[in-house]
Amino acid sequence: MNDWSAIGGLLGGIGLFLLGMSLMTDGLKLAAGPALGRILTYSTKTRIRGLASGALLTAMVQSSSAVTVAAIGFVNAGLLTLGQSLWVLFGSNIGTTMTGWLVALVGLKFKIDLLALPLIGIGMALRLTGEHSRRGATGLALAGFGVLFLGIDMLQTAFSGFTSDFSLSEFDGVTGLLLMVLSGLLMTVLMQSSSASLTIVLTAAQGGLISIESAAAAVIGANIGTTVTALIAAIGATPNAKRAASAHVLFNVLTGIVALLMLPLLVALIAELRDLLQLDSAPAAFLALFHTVFNLMGVLLMWPLVDRLTHFLERRFRTTEEDEARPQHLDANVLGVPTLALDALHQEVRRMGVQSIRLLRDAAGGETQDKLARAQRAIVALNHAIADFVMRLSRTEMSTESAQRLPAILRIARYYETLSELAVELAATMRENTTPIPVEAGKFAAQAEAMLEEVDPATGVRDRATVEAALVTLEDHYQSLKSHLLEAGARGELPVMEMESRLRAASMMRRAIEQAVKAAVMLNVGKTAAAPETESTPA
């Protein structure tokens, strides 16, 4: 066989392997059904369980990329925390070593056609008789296994077909090892499959084309190359998903660097371990063991560092929403000094008020629902942080006067949270309106904006008498608008559904401003006690 035939066989073998891997992965994912999501959601409570889940799922679906994308997707949806996802991602690296063992102990040890062809036949029979069922999915996976083994067989034939004087022994130096790392990385990136590049490396080593150390370096490169999938999955994702992808990259790169620096020692250690386990002396089995050991080494390396890594990543990729949801004045160090802690709470509540007023203005101005929802979530998170700080402060020794301020602070925060909820509802209701805005609605909106200016903590809350006088004027405009809308609906000038929608919107705006007034009066009356609430005017 000439070299061109061998090259053609190499390309064909890679293609068959990728096709088989794709069929097998799709079939296993379909056969597993919702198990992927259930395991990721319920089996990540501890480090060990998360690690085991990632390894098990990757071994099940034979695709670390699928598990990586799923984990990042779950983080994106808020179903997994950043900490939980890290151990799933680390576990997926261990699970992907199953492919190496499959190739080393099965694919390169038996006469392939005795195993592959029956698998393809049985698999397609199951597929044809059970399409859109679990049986059909299992059949697709079996057929994929068969095609994958045919690809391995073709790769073996291709490598054996190269001329006997063709050698890659020059890749044994430091520069050569770095080139092999780069080769493994590029193969994985181009084929989007670390399993395919790993199979090529194992087959080449088995055929004596490359040395053990060169093959091990290529395996390290293939492992680093899997991070590209995580980076692609993180494009346009949430900050937490980007953090999870970054952790995956850091894990693989750091593990790869350490393994490369320790390569001679690792090779010697794994040779001893192989003899101890009485494994086959063939290069493929050695490399499968190397792949497993250096990924386990990576987990051990990250075990004491993961908390610091999580803390480091949480400071990266921050959004405006996350920055606003994070308290700026609440510091555990001031809990021992109640006066300082109360001042910090007061400042944080004022900051929450600024965000709530801005949200209401954005809602009235027609801001997108998605942006409003994100801003509202930040306010809710800030309210939870305030409530938690109040609870911790209440457990400390403080004067009766200081203790009496805590309920008032919680009440103010609750007013602002209610305001934010009404703002989001207001925006959704306003989108239902299609007819021109009546004059009375314009007057009501202008007075509402004037009221927001009066009670916005960012500009300084006016005195109580001024605020309450402005609230009376707002109520007059509201009643005038309400009468106009009811009359227009009764005369048929305004569709009844739109009349109802506009009435709801006006009522929500009035209620939201009342919440802002209550909070502003309590903020302005004094820091030592709660002020009496203003009475809500009947609708």
Image (cartoon, rainbow, N blue to C red):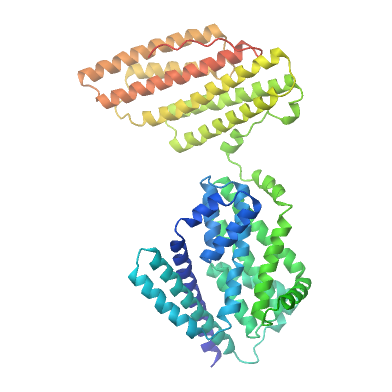
Question: From where the camera sits, is residue 156 visible?
Answer: yes
Give the quarter of the figure containing the C terminus: top left
Q: Residue at x 47, y 18 (%)?
A: 513
Left of 457 or right of it: where is 18? left
* Rendered image quadrant of residue 226: bottom right
Q: Residue at x 54, y 23 (%)?
A: 414
Q: Nearer the viewer, residue 172 or 366?
A: 172
Q: Residue at x 34, y 16 (%)?
A: 440
Q: Position of residue 176 (x, y in %)?
A: 71, 76
Find the residue positioned furthest to the left: 491
Q: Position of residue 89 (x, y in %)?
A: 60, 57
Q: Nearer the viewer, residue 459 or 224?
A: 224
Left of 396 or right of it: where is 92? left
Does 175 appear above or below 326?
below
Q: Position of residue 519 (x, y in %)?
A: 55, 17
For the image, the number of numbered tags is: 0
Q: Nearer the viewer, residue 28 or 536?
A: 28
Q: Nearer the viewer, residue 458 or 26?
A: 26
* Rendered image quadrant of residue 206: bottom right
Question: From where the camera sits, is residue 454 visible?
Answer: no
